[in-house]
Image: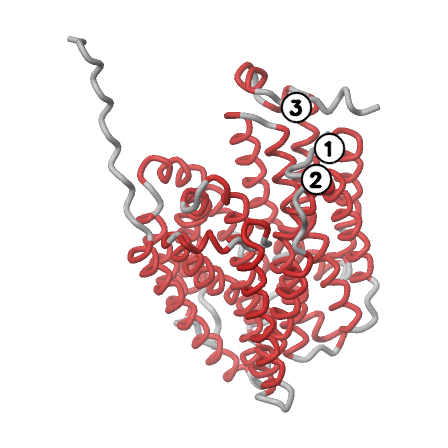
Amino acid sequence: MTGALATPCDAAVAAARPPARNPACRWTLAACILGSSLAFIDGSVVNVALPALQRDLGADAAALAWTINAYLLPLGALILLGGGAGDHFGRRRLFLLGLGLFGLASAACAAAPSIAWLLAGRAMQGVGAALLMPNSLAILGATFQGEARGRAIGTWAAVGALAGAIGPLAGGWLVETVGWRAIFLINLPIAAAAAWLAHAHVRESHGRAAARLDWAGAALATLALALLTWALTEAAGRGAGGLVLPATLMGAALLAGFLWLERRRGPRALLPMAMFASRPFLGLTLLTFLLYGALGGLIVLLPYLLIRIEGWSALAAGAALLPLPLLIGLGSPLMGRLTARHGGRLPLAAGAAVTAAGLALYARLDGEGIAVWTGLMPATALVGIGMALSAAPLTTTVMASVDAGHTGAASGFNSAVARLGGLVATALLGAVLALPGPAEFIAGFRLAALLGAACAGLAAIAALLLIPPPAPVAAPATAAGSG
């Protein structure tokens, strides 16, 4: 039996020693990190394989956009339901289910004989990630207590940033040396190791077991986003066809139906409307959508520009993205501490503004050979610094912007909004990917960089206007009669 091994890390154990010395805690943390790393890596690794997919599977611009969005769509739409299902049915059970589905989907992607097969596999990966991601964090929250919980989640986030750094680099090397199918096959041993650790060492936990799941809300949200994303992709890549307008209207109607249903369900909703009574939460939602939409556009277009237009190898293109996750991983712990002391308004505004400056610098790139150290790297470094200033304060400020009863829903919704920002950006990029020649593509890339800079600039304005400054800390009262 594994129950003896999966003892919870209580506050006394956490205070006495770091969690790595407790075998149950150590293996629980390892299982959660391995499992969530699958989702972190597959969120970026496919970007360096887009030219190879276009060549081998005959994918057009719209299909290339869908290789990203087929993953982001179910992940963004179902991540809240995945967390609720874990609370209801058991977090360990849903984590294992997500791992199994992700592994099977990765094998299907690796065996894909056509782009349609690949897109189906990517959608299955997104569903698996929507199950394992929120439940990996929920397992850590149930296993660790007090300061140990903060250290465990910090380790989880740091390894996630490292996985995001390794993903494009390792993916580029695999595409160059083995082929693009290897970027999916590498998921299988990782998923198997995480599943074995979770089965052997992770204790089952539940949330509100009696809570009913909002299946209807999840279905409406997913269908609405799918129709709207398809309409955006088709309109951007091929022009407004006969089905684009009906799909847009149907998607908008389903989205309105989703909001109506969530309002009726009240606190039992997938997306509790009470959260939106908070003006800071509205500002943070807008900031997240704009900032991560701008970033999502960059990490899709930049590798394509370097590989397809400039003739770089996939490995070199992956290395060009390396400063982004490294700077985020290095800067987030410091920014988390500063935000706890001074609030998130100024770090978020400054981070978004620096990101905007970096994206604007990308508009200087031309098609006559990209200068790495004077053109590419300064822009990439600025974007990385801006996101390092923003990432940890965003998470902390979101949690503080709603009452204690909605912190889990707010965090999950903010994570979904970040992915939906990337989803919309990728859908609109079909117009750039469809441009016929190098000169046209570079002009489209530069315009996209400027639009991304404008979005990040608007995110900075949203932070300043909608997020209040931190309340002054009151001086401790002097006890009556004390000298």
Q: In the rendered structure, which amino acid carries the disc numbered 2?
A: Arg
Q: Residue at x 45, y 48 (%)?
A: 391
Instruction: Tell me how far mark 3 sits from mark 1, CA to CA.
Output: 11 Å
Q: Earlier in the sequence, mark 3 or mark 2?
A: 3
The residue tagged 1 is 204
Instruction: Tell me how far mark 3 sits from mark 2, CA to CA.
Output: 14 Å
Q: Quadrant of residue 119?
A: bottom right
Q: Earlier in the sequence, mark 3 or mark 1?
A: 3
The residue tagged 2 is 91
Viewer can see residue 379: yes
Viewer can see residue 68: no
Q: In the rendered structure, which amino acid carries the disc numbered 1?
A: Glu
Crowd tier of the residue under label 3, counting other residues whose Cα lies within 10 Å: few below 14, some 14–19, many 20 or above: some
Dot 2 falls on a residue whose secondary structure is helix
The residue tagged 3 is 8
Q: Position of residue 140 (x, y in %)?
A: 62, 34
Crowd tier of the residue under label 1, counting other residues whose Cα lies within 10 Å: few below 14, some 14–19, many 20 or above: some
Q: Residue at x 70, y 22 (%)?
A: 7
Q: In the rendered structure, which amino acid carries the disc numbered 3?
A: Pro
Q: Are marks 1 and 2 in contact (CB under 8 Å)?
A: yes
Left or right: 443, with 419 as reference point: left
Q: Residue at x 77, y 73 (%)?
A: 116
Quadrant assignment for the N terminus: top right
Q: Position of residue 21 (x, y in %)?
A: 64, 19
Instruction: Tell me how far mark 1 sits from mark 2, CA to CA.
Output: 6 Å
Q: Quadrant of residue 451?
A: bottom left
Up/down of 37 relative to 144, above or below:
below
Left or right: 22, with 115 as reference point: left
Dot 1 falls on a residue whose secondary structure is loop
Q: Position of residue 343 (x, y in %)?
A: 33, 42
